[in-house]
Amino acid sequence: MMTMDALEASKIISDEYAAKILMGSIRRPRTALELINEFGIPVAACYRRIRMLETKGLLECAEKKLTPEGKRVSAYRSLIRSAQIFFEEGQIKARFEWMTGEVEDLRLDLDHYSL
């Protein structure tokens, strides 16, 4: 499972490039080049987001593909099926449904922060 709180989860999910990578790899594994071409993500930003999403446990390398030139490239798959971010009774909450069917609830109690 993830090692983050609801606020960090909300920042990741609301990041345009991270969201496109997760959405683009939910049905089948996709290479970085496929994601770059389909969603117009800048090359460096795509690779940075992929590394971050892997580190956070939201994305995995599902397979290695061989290009026509004989180069091996990684194909990535989203590990989350759905994500919900909401604010309720003074708390930021996040709910992730994993591809395994498990559900994980995260929260952030704003009383612990001076805003």
Image (tube, rainbow, N blue to C red):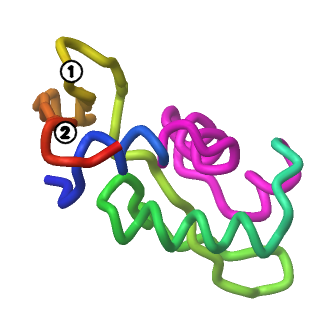
In which quadrant of the rendered image does the C terminus lie?
top left
* Dominant secondary structure (helix, strand or loop) of the stretch shown in magenta: helix
Residue beneath disc 2 = 108
Could you tell me which secondary element the residue under label 2 belongs to?
A: strand
| Callouts 2 and 1 close, C-beta under 8 Å | no
Of the numbered discs 2 and 1, the one sitting upstream in the chain is 1
Q: How many marks?
A: 2
Residue located at (66% from left, 40% from top):
20
Query: Residue 62 appears at what percent x and percent y?
Result: 42, 61
- Which amino acid type corresponds to the residue marked 1 in the rendered image? Gly
- Which amino acid type corresponds to the residue marked 2 in the rendered image? Leu
Q: Which span is picked out in magenta?
A: 12-38
Whether 76 is drawn above or below 98: the answer is: below
Query: Residue 83 appears at what percent x and percent y?
Result: 36, 27
Residue located at (88% from left, 52% from top):
37
Residue located at (85% from left, 63% from top):
42
Crowdedness near tag 1: few (<14), some (14–19) or many (≥20) residues, C-alpha within 10 Å: few
Question: Which of the two discs, 2 and 1, sits closer to the camera?
Answer: 1
Viewer-proximal residue among 27 and 68: 27
Residue lying at the far front of the rendered structure: 114
Residue 25 inside the magenta-drawn segment = yes
Whether 112 is drawn above or below 95: the answer is: below
| Rendering quarter of residue 102 | top left
Q: Is residue 92 left or right of residue 46?
A: left
Query: Residue 4 appears at what percent x and percent y?
Result: 23, 55
Q: Could you tell me how far apart the alpha carbons at marks 2 and 1 are, in whole angstroms?
A: 9 Å
Viewer-proximal residue among 101 and 83: 83
Residue 19 inside the magenta-drawn segment = yes
Residue beneath disc 1 = 90
